[in-house]
Image: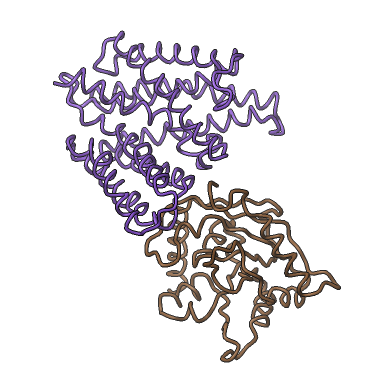
Chain colours: A purple, B brown
Amino acid sequence: MNAVQTDFLWLLAGIGSILIVASITGYLLAWKYSPDGSNEAIENLNARIEAWWLMVILLSIAFLGGKTGVLILFAFCSFAALREFATLTNTRQADHVALVGAFFVVLPIQYISIGTGWYGFYSIFIPVWAFLLMPIAAAIRGDTNQFLVRVAETQWALMICVFCASHVPALLNLEIEGYEGRNVLLIAFLVVVVQLSDVLQYVWGKLFGKTKVAPRLSPSKTLEGLVGGIASATLIGASLWWLTPFTPLEAGALSLVITVMGFFGGLVMSAIKRDRGVKDWGHMIAGHGGFIDRLDSVVFSAPVFFHLVRFGWTP
Amino acid sequence: MSTFLAGIVGSAILVFARFITAVRGIWQGIDPVVGQRIYFANHSSHGDFVLIWTVLPPRLRRGTRPVAGADYWMASWLKRFIGRDVFKAVLIDRNPDTRTSDPVDQMAEALDSGASLIVFPEGTRNTTEEVLLDFKSGLYHLAKKRQEVDLVPVWIANLNRVMPKGERFPVPLICTVTFGEPLKVGPKETKARFLKRAEKALLALRPENGDGPQ
């Protein structure tokens, strides 16, 4: 077994024990307070824990599959997220070709080019090529009704669900001195810190939450949850420095940046849901709503994390 | 051999339908339990009965047959195979001048053999701007003929956006299939009144925002 695998197994053991404790706690809570499954908060908590197990298992399988495994997993996440996003847009029949292109041409090209490691292409393909070609495909059909709204929505959907999300597997392409062959741990670091921050914000908010930070956007978000969650996730991130090419201080600083980005990502995506009058993006994951509901924070933090690491740690 | 192949093709169609639409059944007025039913749904796409079929639990799915136009489903060997062998469709001749048997009798016969049916009372695909076309009278005659069978309204949302008329490729969007409370024709109810009531029961299942977000 090599060093990467050993480190990954340690991380997995850590997450596994947290999840076992969580599962036992959830089971005891359900046994004591909700034997007939009537307490919604507890049922929701247990559904979340179950979905967490599933996510950890999927991510581990993808890591075993190496770069291809990670690319396939995130390409599938992008597909599911884009499907949820497109469902909420105002697109009309005139956008049909552009949308089919987004799913079956743009998405595969983005992930394949990340697979090839061609930074000069995958970092501009959607912001430049798709940005210009998609409205052309829509304009040719001649329907001007809400044209700018439709074109903007389609581009936004691609940027969030495909471009931003694809920066998670793109971390595998960074060439960091002395860190060769260990990049998969950068993905683990990003996902674990950001997702833990989500959970910890939820837990801190449930325990001590009083002051609402965004009552109109997301009534469940509280200042206490936000500060407690981000602070504790930052500390955990700093303590995970051994996974990364960073010093503990750097790991902590980067954790702070990605958890703050993650928080605001959740806020922005909530604003879209409010506007469209839905509570969740979809119903894919029990207890979590849709894919976007779970991925919003990772999606917002991945490109920032990618570019900070690329700027600071690659030659 | 043909049954085996039909099973494989059937499963492949289910996987494809889920991949494109992530379809979810909402059992609002009735539970997904075994029982003979006539599901009547809005019709805007050739994939409509596939979606209903997909959200039915396997035990119900096996005994549920769509009622479809023979003119479309007999047109090529592939359609014949899918229509007859995979979905076991009750194929009816929609042209009164050429048909040799009455469609309502055919449906009643299928019910007598124990099957549940999926019917589209609008009679044809709705490609207009109207939300729902006026029902044809077949649903009334069938309900009169087999009064003991529950009629279940089923609203299929968003599938017309997945594959609008004239497009060649589907665009992946989330669809829902909502099952309403069953109804039966009243002993003294007139045809017009029953059809209006059935239309209303179906329209009541349409999501507030229509074919928007699900």
Residue at x 53%, y 64% (from the top left corner): B48
Q: Looking at the image, which is closer to me, B54 or A219?
A: A219
In percent of the image, x 44 and y 61: which residue is there? B163
Is A3 left, or right, of B200 in this rendering? left
- Residue farthest along the top direction in this orientation: A249
Expressed as whole percent of the image width and height from the top left, the position of residue B47 reads: 49, 64
- Left or right of residue A12: residue B119: right
Viewport quadrant of the N terminus of chain B: bottom left
Image coordinates of residue A304 in percent, x first then y, are: 31, 24
Q: For this rendering, which residue is in front, B169 or A60?
A: B169
Q: Quadrant of residue B178?
A: bottom right
Residue B91 location in percent, x, y?
56, 79
Residue placed most toward the observer, A158 or A254: A158
The residue that appears at 20% across and 18% down in the rendered structure is: A313
Q: Is residue B37 above or below residue A91?
A: below
Q: Position of residue B52 (x, y in %)?
A: 57, 60
Q: What residue is at 29 percent from the left and 18 percent from the top?
A: A243
Q: Name the residue at the left extreme.
A: A315
Asked whether, in this view, residue B64 is left or right of residue A112, the answer is right
Residue A276 position by quadrant = top right
- Number of labels in the image equals 0
Q: Residue furthest front?
A: A144
Q: Quadrant of residue A6?
A: top left
A308 displayed left or right of A16: left
Give B66 or A224, whichever is nearer the viewer: A224
